[in-house]
Image (cartoon, rainbow, N blue to C red):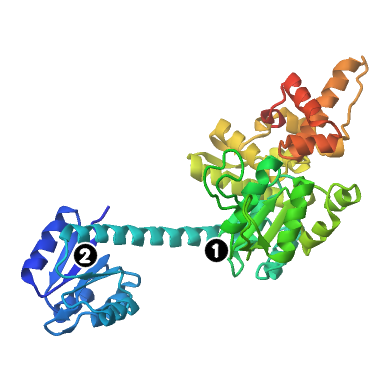
């Protein structure tokens, strides 16, 4: 790592020498000057300065005026101002010019060195934060939603139209279709893109803990609440809150969420203090909320509050023209990230993949490419690389409608029924991204019954590939 370059501007030679020694020992590159003219020469000659220490009273002028030159050349460079004649006016003037810190002579050199270290750390943190935001915004621009089919183009057009509004958006679609990616694209293409994007999966957190996760809590609100904690609504202030699996919200929390959406305020658990909420809500679900409303499992008034702008994400089987593009995208991704050299897919293998129903959608396709890439390492993906499961089920497993042929010599009924049951369970699990609660709902089973069957049959995610 290159040394941080520091400029010291002070007319006291002994002080310059002392600062040169102490900062050189701290592995900084130090340039010292005794007046404004010399400092301006240094500024002109150096494309990079990390920090400046400037005395106010210099032989050829006011050192504070040098701050403008430094800021103009180096942007957010931290500047520490030194003076032997402290006054409120001087401090205010230095602050307005962008000074990071103000010190009165005489001062402790070790204290100054500590402030310099903090200033440089702060600058590095600000730079990394800016870079991260730039990367995130680039990552979630429209170009990173892969596909050219009409269904996905319609989704992109909708994002472009609604991203910059503050209206609540309800993103629906099967598990694995990329609902969170869509939510991030909405956020990072909105006027809130410089603020936080805060996701929470409402189906992954027990309902008794979810209220605290959403709204925060105060110390002593319940057993284990040993300190105050901010909730997701507070963390997402001025930004976007992504409520994934909103259909799993308990009736009690549905009421509280409705109140926040209506009144734009909430109270942390155990607190009487009301906190204002300036949050843009993007909710997502793979559940038919309209049906859930009719069945009394979801509040109708909350549904309409969430469904201001509905956005349906197509299943992969509804945008099959994108399968070759997605395959190529994920091949390139794993080639780059894992040092693999897959060159493409054989046409016969591509035909098999195009006719597969992809119940797990894009997530399943990505997992397939990752597994095959790791096993093959290099060359072209052949039909022999495609697991038999893909080849045996070409688009006939939708909604559990499995095609079973009875051979001439017959079959074992119990074995066939067991196989059919296995496939129904796997289809439901794949469809919900192995969310056992949602799979149980699809199969109209008790969750405990489904979990027992999965355990007894030894079913695992790997069995779907």
Q: Is 403 in front, or is 174?
A: 174
Q: Quadrant of residue 97?
A: bottom left
CA–CA distance between discs 2 and 1?
32 Å
Classify mark 1: residues with Cα within 10 Å, few (<14), some (14-19) or many (20+): some
Instruction: Check the image and report above or below for 315 versus 309.
Output: above
Percent x, y of residue 12: 8, 72
Residue that mark 1 sits on: 195
Residue 415 in which image quadrant: top right
Nearer-N-terminus badge (2/1): 2
Q: Position of residue 78 (x, y in %)?
A: 30, 68
In-front residue for pair 101/329: 101
Q: Residue at x 65, y 37 (%)?
A: 368
Task: Assign the C terminus to one quadrant of the image.
Answer: top right
Helix, strand or loop at label 1? It is loop
Q: How many marks?
A: 2
Q: Residue 168 sits in which quadrant? A: bottom right
Give the image location of residue 273, x and y in percent.
61, 59
**Which residue lies at the image location 53% right of the left edge and 42% below the top edge?**
226
Badge 2: residue crowd in 10 Å (few <14, some 14–19, many ≥20):
many
Q: Residue at x 87, y 20 (%)?
A: 416
Q: Secondary structure at mark 2?
A: strand
Residue at point 39%, 61% (across, down): 127
Q: Which residue is mark 2?
A: 6
């Amino acid at each position: 790592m290159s040394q941080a370059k520091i400029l010291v501007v002070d007319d006291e030679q002994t002080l310059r020498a002392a600062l040169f020694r102490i900062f050189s020992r701290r592995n900084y590159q130090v340039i010292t000057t005794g007046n404004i003219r010399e400092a301006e020469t240094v500024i002109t000659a150096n494309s990079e300065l990390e920090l400046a220490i400037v005395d106010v009273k210099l032989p050829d002028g006011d050192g504070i005026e040098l701050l403008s030159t430094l800021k103009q050349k180096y942007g957010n460079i931290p500047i520490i101002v030194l003076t032997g004649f402290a006054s409120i006016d001087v401090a205010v003037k230095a602050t307005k010019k962008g000074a990071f810190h103000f010190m009165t002579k005489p001062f402790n050199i070790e204290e100054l060195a500590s402030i310099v270290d903090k200033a440089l750390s702060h600058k590095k943190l600000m730079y990394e934060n800016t870079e991260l935001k730039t990367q995130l915004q680039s990552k979630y621009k429209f170009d990173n939603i892969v596909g050219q089919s009409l269904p996905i183009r319609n989704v992109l057009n909708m994002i472009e139209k609604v991203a910059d509004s503050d209206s609540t958006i309800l993103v629906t679609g099967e598990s694995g279709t990329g609902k969170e990616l869509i939510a991030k694209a909405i956020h990072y293409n909105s006027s809130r893109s410089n603020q936080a994007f805060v996701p929470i999966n409402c189906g992954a957190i027990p309902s008794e803990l979810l209220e605290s996760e959403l709204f925060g809590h105060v110390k002593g609100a319940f057993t284990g609440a040993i300190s105050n904690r901010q909730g997701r609504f507070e963390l997402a202030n001025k930004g976007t809150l992504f409520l994934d699996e909103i259909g799993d919200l308990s009736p009690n929390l549905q009421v509280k969420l409705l109140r926040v959406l209506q009144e734009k305020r909430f109270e942390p658990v155990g607190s009487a203090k009301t906190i204002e909420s300036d949050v843009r809500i993007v909710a997502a679900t793979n559940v038919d909320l309209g049906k859930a409303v009719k069945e009394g499992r979801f509040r109708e008034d909350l549904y309409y509050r969430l469904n201001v702008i509905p956005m349906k994400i197509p299943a992969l089987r509804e945008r099959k023209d994108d399968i070759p593009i997605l395959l190529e995208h994920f091949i390139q991704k794993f080639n780059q990230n894992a040092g693999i050299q897959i060159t493409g897919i054989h046409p016969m293998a591509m035909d098999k993949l195009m006719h597969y129903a992809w119940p797990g959608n894009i997530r399943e396709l990505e997992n397939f490419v990752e597994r095959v890439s790791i096993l093959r390492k290099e060359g072209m993906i052949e039909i022999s690389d495609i697991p038999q499961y893909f080849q045996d089920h070409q688009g006939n497993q939708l909604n559990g409608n499995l095609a079973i042929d009875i051979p001439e010599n017959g079959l074992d009924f119990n074995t066939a029924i067991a196989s059919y049951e296995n496939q129904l369970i796997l289809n439901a699990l794949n469809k919900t991204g192995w969310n056992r609660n949602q799979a149980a709902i699809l199969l109209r089973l008790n969750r405990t019954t489904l979990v027992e069957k999965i355990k007894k049959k030894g079913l695992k995610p790997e069995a779907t590939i």
